[in-house]
Amino acid sequence: MLLRSGYFLKRALRNMRQSPVLSLASIGTVAVALALLAFFAIAVLNVQQLTASWGENLAVVAYLEDVPEQKVVNGWIKEVESYPEVAKVTFVSRKAALERFSQRLGDDADLIEGLGEDVLPASLEIALGSEWRSKSSLTSVVERLRKDQRFSDLQYGQGWLEKLEAFLLLLRVAGSALGGFLVFAALIIVANTIKLTLYARQDELEAMAMVGGTSLFIKLPYLVEGALQGLLGGLTALGLSFLVFQIILQKTLGSLLLITGIDTIHFLPPVWQGSLVVGGGLIGLMGSLFALRKFVRFGVS
Amino acid sequence: MIQLFNVCKAYQRDQNALNDVTLKVEKGEFVYLTGPSGAGKSTLLKLLYCAERPTRGQILVNGRNVTRYGPARIPYLRRNLGIIFQDFKLLKRRTVFENVAFPLEVQGRKRFEISKKVYQALKSVGLEHRLNHYPLQLSGGEQQRVAVARALVVDPLILLADEPTGNLDPEVTLDIMGLFKGANARGTTIIMATHDRSLIREFPRRIVSLDAGRLANDDLPLFRGTAVKAGQP
């Protein structure tokens, strides 16, 4: 059968040429369904990247009651940096803390003028590694630091982190559900569109069965046709979503999005682009398969 | 070549389209299947090419019991049969050549062999000059001749024809009958459903009559001077 793949491909291409309107309807259906999916994926991807970047600022601040010598501090830094979750520990002296505060006050910096250098406590800023930016890792680090008497107070954005995690989970679940629904809807629509094309060819399928065509021999050109239409639909969807991304998201909405803190909008990564096209092919193939089940039965009751 | 043993077919409960039909057709025979509309002629043919299954009884085609053939075996049975319909059932989006070539493509024959056999088949039905035309560009008679060429191109053991001349004018009918006679002379067993009495008179052969699903009569043509009783194999 593999040796005759050229025959099936030729037949599929010829079927498409002979019914251009029906073929375009199938390609268009796949394209619209997958373009919707692509737009949705672009939105989810960018929101995910934005929220992930919020997590980059996640750190535990351990305030020091008394500031020991620099040598001792360096020892503490090394010790905390040896925790697997910790990426970097920075020592912020009292003076540096005051300077930073003064900078933040900006024009109102004169409010703290005259205050002594020791008004703010020194601290260790403990940044977590990117793969450890989760509530559980943060809690684990904080638990260990709490047991240590050297650190008088610990500050970390637990409430904020919980909200972020809940939001990301919601995004993931909603994204998967909506994405799954869109793929399913695309599959149903494509299967029905292909079914319509098969209604037009019912006599042809019956005639093929009458001269001894096996189920596979009859179905294969239509399966190849469905897969080709799906691939073309996937490519069209990719082109369409790229066009919308370039024209609407980048040029028109770009400046508006900057206000919300999104400086760069990302398009789908190459793997996703490939998946969109291959997915189109698979949807076309599955759609044909569903539709053909009903049509090639050899008229056996 | 074909044997039916007490075959019944019911599409609905208590409504038999065929009722206890027992029949034997020898290799190389030409048999007319006659009877009024609804007598069960098409049903009997459908049972032979496995488009329907009998409700009861056994059917042997070329020595094989096809009664319980599954979908995977049916195509291979049909490759030994030529089937012709009143409405031709040609592939409208394929040329005459491609229509006749299709049964050979299905069998995986080589391209050179296909070209040769298709040309010979089309020549035998007088349509070799129409090979690049599409069915809808042909007259009804020409379309039926293409269907005959498609049926005969595989050198079938059995030709099953369901009212093949029902839509054709008398002149074309004679042409088609001539083609059937030729195939029969080359050894193909033919079962042809028809109600055309004049056709039977013109080309007298064994007549199997059905009435309300029952075998009403099974006569050998008078010129042979013999007749057999209904229901006798």
Image (cartoon, coloured by chain):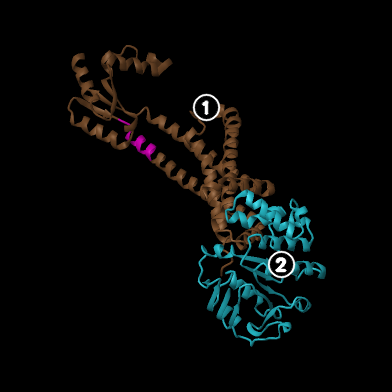
User: Quadrant of the image for the C terminus of chain A?
Assistant: bottom right
Q: Is residue A188 visible?
A: no
Q: Residue at x 35, y 38 (%)?
A: A162
Q: Is residue B183 left or right of residue B13?
A: right
- Which element carries disc 1, helix, strand or loop? helix
Residue highlighted by disc 1: A258
> Percent from the top left, x then y, of residue B144?
74, 63
Q: Which chain is home to disc 2? A: B
Q: Residue at x 73, y 66 (%)?
A: B179
Q: Which mark is residue A290?
A: none
Q: As rendered, which of A146 and A218 lies closer to the eye?
A: A218
| Label 1: few (<14), some (14–19) or many (≥20) C-alpha neighbours in 10 Å | few
Residue furthest to the bottom: B229
Whether the magenta-drawn stretch holds residue B110 is answered as no
Looking at numbered disc 2 in the image, what kind of residue is underneath it? Gly
Q: Looking at this view, is B230 or B54 the one in front?
A: B230
Estimate the x, y position of residue B230 in percent, counting from the top left.
63, 86
Whole-percent x, y for residue B188 in the image:
64, 68
Q: Nearer the viewer, mark 1 or mark 2?
A: 2
The quadrant in which residue A210 appears is bottom right
- The amino acid sitting under disc 1 is Leu
Image height of A27 relative to B109, above or below: above
Q: Which residue matches tag 2?
A: B182
A161 inside magenta stretch: yes
| Residue A10 lies in quadrant | top right
Question: What residue range appears in magenta?
Answer: A156-165
Q: Colour of chain B?
A: cyan
